[in-house]
Image (spheres, rainbow, N blue to C red):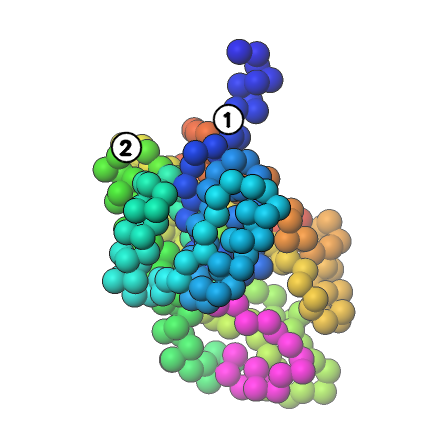
Amino acid sequence: MTAEASVLRAFDLSGKIAVITGGAGLLGVRHAEAIAEMGGTPVLLDISDDRARASADDIVRRFGGQAAGMHADITDPASVASAMRDITARFGPVDILINNAANNPKMEASDPNQRHWTRLETFPIAVWDQDVAVGLTGAFLCSQAFGTAMASRGRGVILSVASDLGLVAPDQRIYREEGVPEAHQRVKPVTYSVVKHGLIGLTRYLATYWADSGVRVNSLSPGGIYDGQEPGFVTRLTNLIPMGRMAQADEYKAAVVFLVSDASSYMTGANLVIDGGRTAW
């Protein structure tokens, strides 16, 4: 086997079963496409099973192979356990878990309600509970279920999708609106930072906990991804990014394949930052 062949083989995901939470979302679908393109079988878990199934069907049409969309409430241990049983019965043991699900409201100037509830002083406890439940507790419950099964078999990979805001605090100036009093300015919600920082901590904990069980655990911290945000916001954000632009959603596919494949076989407990250089400033 040549050196070139060995490198290519390290990225191959043929025969691998990969579960992706929040699988019907902006990045979840891209993660699934990347898995399918490299020969793996993506299983898209989402609270919206219709969207997950439609996305999985589209992936099969475009890439061939197998894919599935399934309903799961990752905040509910019973729902996670049920999903794991269904997946295992249909495809066999899960090799890869991507903790991708999160609540992340768009910060739109056209939504006056955000001026109230996003502020720390008036942040609703119900929103706190739900954001933490989906983004952090859900990642824990899925890691507990799927990771324990991986550890029992002596192999597996867990990848959690964090954020550059898991490393630095949000610069609230990019959400400001002219003429709005300070007490009513929109801000990035506190839960987003808490959840993303927490995912990096969970990654390090699980990586060392299962280090001798053949389970690798890493996180990926993307920067801001363009998804039709208002032009003023895009300009203010890109001024904070050395590369001068937001990311495109497809730009994380190769990184995901690297992190869940044997190409990163000596990597665990790490956080891969791909943010256009934002956290370098």
Q: Is residue 155 above or below residue 219?
A: above
Q: Position of residue 126 (x, y in %)?
A: 38, 80
Report how far apart the C-alphas of labels 1 and 2 lie in the structure: 19 Å
Q: Amino acid at mark 2?
A: Gly
Task: Specify start and end residues of the magenta stretch as a single range.
Answer: 103-118
Is residue 206 something one can see in this rendering?
no
Q: Position of residue 37 (x, y in %)?
A: 57, 39
Residue at horizontal 57 percent and vertical 12 percent from the top: 2
Q: Residues within 10 Å of mark 1 (few under 14, many from 20)?
A: some
In terms of sequence position, does the residue under pointer 1 or pointer 2 come before the other? 1
Residue at the left extreme, as displayed: 152
Q: Is residue 126 left or right of residue 209?
A: right
Viewer-side residue, 185 vs 23: 23
Is residue 178 something one can see in this rendering?
yes
Task: Please report contact status of discs 1 and 2: CB closer than 8 Å, yes or no.
Answer: no
Tag of residue 10: 1
**Is 109 within the magenta?**
yes
Residue 132 occupies which quadrant of the picture? bottom left
Q: Is residue 118 left or right of residue 73?
A: right
Disc 1, SS: helix
Magenta span: chief secondary structure: loop
Q: Is residue 24 left or right of residue 218?
A: right
Disc 2, SS: loop
Residue at horizontal 48 percent and vertical 65 percent from the top: 50
Which residue is labeled 2 in the image? 154
Residue at horizontal 37 percent and vertical 39 percent from the top: 95
**Is 194 within the magenta?**
no
Q: Is residue 138 above or below residue 266?
A: below
Q: Position of residue 38 (x, y in %)?
A: 55, 36
Number of numbered labels in the structure image: 2
Q: Amino acid at mark 1?
A: Ala
Tag of residue 113: none
